Image (cartoon, rainbow, N blue to C red):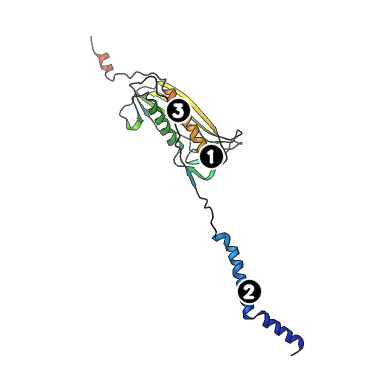
Amino acid sequence: MGFNDGANEAMKQRTNGPGDLRRLGMLSLSAMLLLCSGCLGPREVVGPKTFMLRPTIAVPKAEKALAATLGVREFEAPVQYDRRMVVLEPDFRLDALSNQSWAETPATTLTRCVTDAILASAHFSDVGNAFNMARPNTELTGELRAFHVNRTVKPAVAEVELRLELRDALSPKVLWSGTLCEVEPLADDQGSALAVAMNAAVGRLSAKAATALSAVEYVAEDPNAFLEKGKKP
């Protein structure tokens, strides 16, 4: 064996000894632990978020109480206003916030909020779901026309618009109609900011609807009146 061959063999023995292998294994383990530390550490789990609408509605008592009853029909809404949090973009394109939604459809929420506000005004003798009432004197219908973040204006706002019609239940006569709209600036682009702003806007709109209906005059007709008219003198 030559000198060079002996030197190479000595080097192999020094680098492949038990101590070196142990150190190499420890270094490898340390590297793996460092790589995995990010996976093993605490993380915020980002998942779907659901927001509720429970606005505070302040409604003054009506100056006059009617003997008439009011049946409220479930408000209608375009298909885009489902549980998604809708955004109206500057190019008038409708989009939605990712993984963020309402707890129920806006039409259902608005129907309940407006009904509660009318009840609080105490203008009608009874207020309820039209389908659950025998024969209400009047009926209220609604069409939700806007329920979104409006980014066509700056700063962006939460916008809600509702068309309401109050009719005599026994005739096509319109007793009152109006289109109500409320906007509320957003603190930021998050769903939580939209929920806060929309609660404020829906609260004001519901109170405005109840106040407008509190000024409606209506005298309930006697259902037997037509029999009296038909009697001969």
For discs 2 and 3, the disc positioned in front in the rendered view: 2
Image quarter of residue 91: top right
Amino acid beneath label 2: Leu
Question: What residue is rendered at 49% in x and 27% in y?
Answer: 180
Give above or below for 203 relative to 171: below
- How many numbered marks does the figure carry? 3
Position in image of residue 119 (x %, y %): 38, 28
Image quarter of residue 64: top left
> Furthest residue to the right?
3
SS state under label 1: helix
Give above or below for 78 relative to 216: below
Question: What residue is rendered at 45% in x and 28% in y?
Answer: 207
Amino acid beneath label 1: Ala
- Whether residue 163 is visible: yes
Give above or below for 196 relative to 98: above
Left or right: where 186 falls relative to 126: right
Question: What residue is rendered at 57% in x and 62% in y?
Answer: 37
Query: Where does label 3 land, which residue?
Result: 207
Left or right: where 24 falls relative to 81: right
Query: Where does label 2 land, which residue?
Result: 24
The mark that comes first in sequence, 3 or 1, is: 1
Question: What residue is rendered at 47% in x and 24% in y?
Answer: 178
Left or right: where 11 falls relative to 196: right
Query: Where does label 1 land, which residue?
Result: 193
Distance Cα–Cα, label 3 vs label 1: 22 Å
Q: Nearer the viewer, residue 190 or 143?
A: 190
